[in-house]
């Protein structure tokens, strides 16, 4: 069983930074692509960033390019999302997800495992 636990969310003023972490149980972590998604009430879950199993490829939605950075530490079974220059529009519950396919994708249905989410609130 694969379990994902996010941490690092919180309240920050616009222009500030947060780093989200997602700890993944299971020895197959290094074979999974990992992704971050976010969701606000009444809206579909939105792709934010993804990273391939090796970390050699990363993908971002346009609205976060240049501000967010996804990375992973396979020795620690952890994926990170460094979020800089945060904007009120970034306010959402952020979820990490694992894709056994390994290549990374912006499509939510590619991901078999999901965390419980962590709230990020950015004030103006």
Image (cartoon, rainbow, N blue to C red):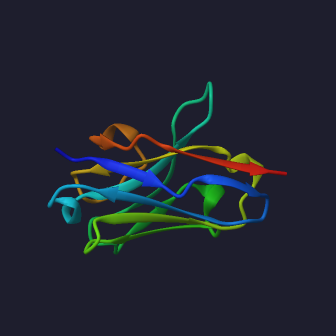
Compared across the picture, whether 3 is left or right of 120 comes to: left
Between 51 and 4, which is closer to the camera in this rendering?
Answer: 4
Q: Which residue is drawn at 14% across and 61% down?
A: 27
Rendered location of residue 48, percent (x, y): 52, 52
Q: Which residue is drawn at 29% across and 42% down?
A: 113
Q: Residue at x 22, y 60 (%)?
A: 29
Between 31 and 16, which is closer to the camera in this rendering?
Answer: 16
Q: Residue furthest right?
A: 124
Q: In this view, does 61 lie above or below 43?
A: below
Compared across the picture, whether 80 is left or right of 104 comes to: right
Rendered location of residue 1, percent (x, y): 16, 44
Rendered location of residue 15, percent (x, y): 78, 65
Q: Residue at x 67, y 50 (%)?
A: 90
Rendered location of residue 109, percent (x, y): 34, 37
Label tally: 0
Looking at the rendering, which quadrant does residue 79 occupy? bottom left
Compared across the picture, whether 76 is left or right of 41 comes to: left
């Amino acid at each position: 069983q694969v379990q994902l636990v996010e941490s690092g969310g919180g309240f920050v003023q616009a222009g500030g930074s947060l780093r989200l972490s997602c700890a993944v149980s299971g020895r197959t972590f290094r074979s999974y692509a990992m992704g971050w998604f976010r969701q606000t009430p009444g809206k579909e879950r939105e792709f934010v960033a993804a990273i391939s199993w090796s970390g050699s490829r990363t993908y971002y939605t346009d609205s976060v390019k240049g501000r967010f950075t996804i990375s992973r530490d396979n020795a620690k079974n952890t994926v990170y999302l460094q979020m800089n220059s945060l904007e009120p529009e970034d306010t959402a519950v952020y979820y990490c997800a694992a894709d056994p396919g390994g290549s990374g994708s912006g499509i939510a249905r590619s991901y078999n495992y999901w965390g419980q989410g962590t709230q990020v609130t950015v004030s103006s």
